[in-house]
Each structure stands twice: as C-alpha cells, then as structure tokens.
Image (cartoon, rainbow, N blue to C red):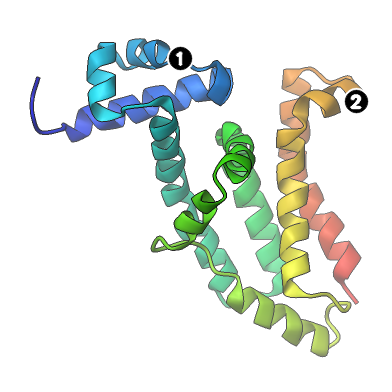
C-alpha cells in the first residue's frame, strides 16, 4: 500500500460516501458499502478514514466548503435584503436538496458533540451575517422593512429551508406526497419561502 495518500483515491472515496450517505443516512451506511461503491477494499478505506464518523465529517466539510463561499457572497454583497433573501433561499435550498443528510447530521452532532459547529466556525470562509444584520437594521430605519432583528430574520430563513428536509417523512404523510411529488414541492419552496418572508417583513 502506498505510504502517501492519493488525492484521486480520496476524492473517489468522498464521492462514494456522499452517494451512500444520501441513500442510507449516517446510521444506515456501512463502511463496506462505501468501499464497494468506491471500488476499493475496506482496508484501503480505513487507511484514509479510520471511522465512519470521520468520513462523514469529511464529506460534510467538503460539501460545506463548496457552498460557504457562495452563501458568504450573497450575505455580503451590495444587493437589497429582498434580493439577498431570494438568492440565499434558492441557493441554500438547492444545496440541502443535493445533500439532504447534512441537516440531520448537524443536529446529531450538536447533541453528541456541541464543539463540532464551534470548530467549524473557526475555519476560514465560514459565512458571516454581520453585514446582513447591519443592512436589515438600516432598511428597518428607512421604513423599507417592518421592525425585525437581522438575527431573527436569518433564523427564520434557515428554519423554513431546513425543516422540510429534516421532517420529510412526517410532512409526506400529512400531505400524502410520494418522493417525486415531495421533490417538486421542495423545488417550489425555493421561491415560496422567499415570497412568504418578504411579504411578512415588507413595510
């Protein structure tokens, strides 16, 4: 076995793990399944990642690293709050629809390992909402928006985006939707969530 880890093999493992985690979730995924999907043996997989937890964290970090710059750009550009809400909601929902296991993983990690997000926050590129908060306050003062704190608005956006992913089995049962119908519903939420929030906060 080569002593230097190969970047192509590592990328192959991450892609395989992402696919298996999407299908089976964190609890249902097995390292042997991931090794088979990557076309390597289990010993090789453990050479790169000693545990399923470490592999899951690597998949999360890789996915988050792709999305964080885009979210950061939206939050910190010079567009209006309405435009930010529309762009952020569309891009954030698109991201979590592509990685539906991530919201559940974050909640699991918050319960099991509260320092997980704290450690993520210290990494370069973690999205900042400071400019967003200042801009919300300015638009409230100008009479463009009803009184609302930037933090509350940001939490509302996240909650409306993430809850349908986390609670999908329950919501599917309530609205009697199959997987295809539910995917279509989530697609429509990329604009519905933004419209709902904007209509609620515009003065």
Residue 46 at x, y percent in the picture: 28, 22
Q: Which residue is mark 2?
A: 175
Whether residue 191 appears in this view of the structure is: no
* Closer mark to the observer between disc 1 and disc 2: 1
Q: How far apart are the two marked residues, 1 and 2, measured between alpha carbons?
A: 32 Å
Question: Would you name the residue on which mark 1 appears?
Answer: 30
> Would you say 111 lies left or right of 37 here?
right
Q: Quadrant of the C terminus?
A: bottom right
Query: Which percent across, then down, holds residue 43?
Result: 24, 15
User: Looking at the image, can residue 127 be seen?
Assistant: yes
Return the disc, 1 or 2, that comes first in the chain's sequence.
1
Q: Quadrant of the N terminus?
A: top left
Residue at 72% x, 47% y: name it: 161
Q: Residues within 10 Å of mark 1 (few under 14, many from 20)?
A: some
The image quadrant of residue 105 is top right
For the point 37% across and 26% down, the residue is: 51
Q: Is residue 71 above or below residue 105?
A: below
Q: Is residue 34 left or right of residue 106?
A: left
Q: Position of residue 121 (x, y in %)?
A: 49, 61
Q: Are marks 1 and 2 in contact (CB under 8 Å)?
A: no
- 120 sits left or right of 23 in the view: left
Residue 11: % across, % down = 29, 32
């Amino acid at each position: 076995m080569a002593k230097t880890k190969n970047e192509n093999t590592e990328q192959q493992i991450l892609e395989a793990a992402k696919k298996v985690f999407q299908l089976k979730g964190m609890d249902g995924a097995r390292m042997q399944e991931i090794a088979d999907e990557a076309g390597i043996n289990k010993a090789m997989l453990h050479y790169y990642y000693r545990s399923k937890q470490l592999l899951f964290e690597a998949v999360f970090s890789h996915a988050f690293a792709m999305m964080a710059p885009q979210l950061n750009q939206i939050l910190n550009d010079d567009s209006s709050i309405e435009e930010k809400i529309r762009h952020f909601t569309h891009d954030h929902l698109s991201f979590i629809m592509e990685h539906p296991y991530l919201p559940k993983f974050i909640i699991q990690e918050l319960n099991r390992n509260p320092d997980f997000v704290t450690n993520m926050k210290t990494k370069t590129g973690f999205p900042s909402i400071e400019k967003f908060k200042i801009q919300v306050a300015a638009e409230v003062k100008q009479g463009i928006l009803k009184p609302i704190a930037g933090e509350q608005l940001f939490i509302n956006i996240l909650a409306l985006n993430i809850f349908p992913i986390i609670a999908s089995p329950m919501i599917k049962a309530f609205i009697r939707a199959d997987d295809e119908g539910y995917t279509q519903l989530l697609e429509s939420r990329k604009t519905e969530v933004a419209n709902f929030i904007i209509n609620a906060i515009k003065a």
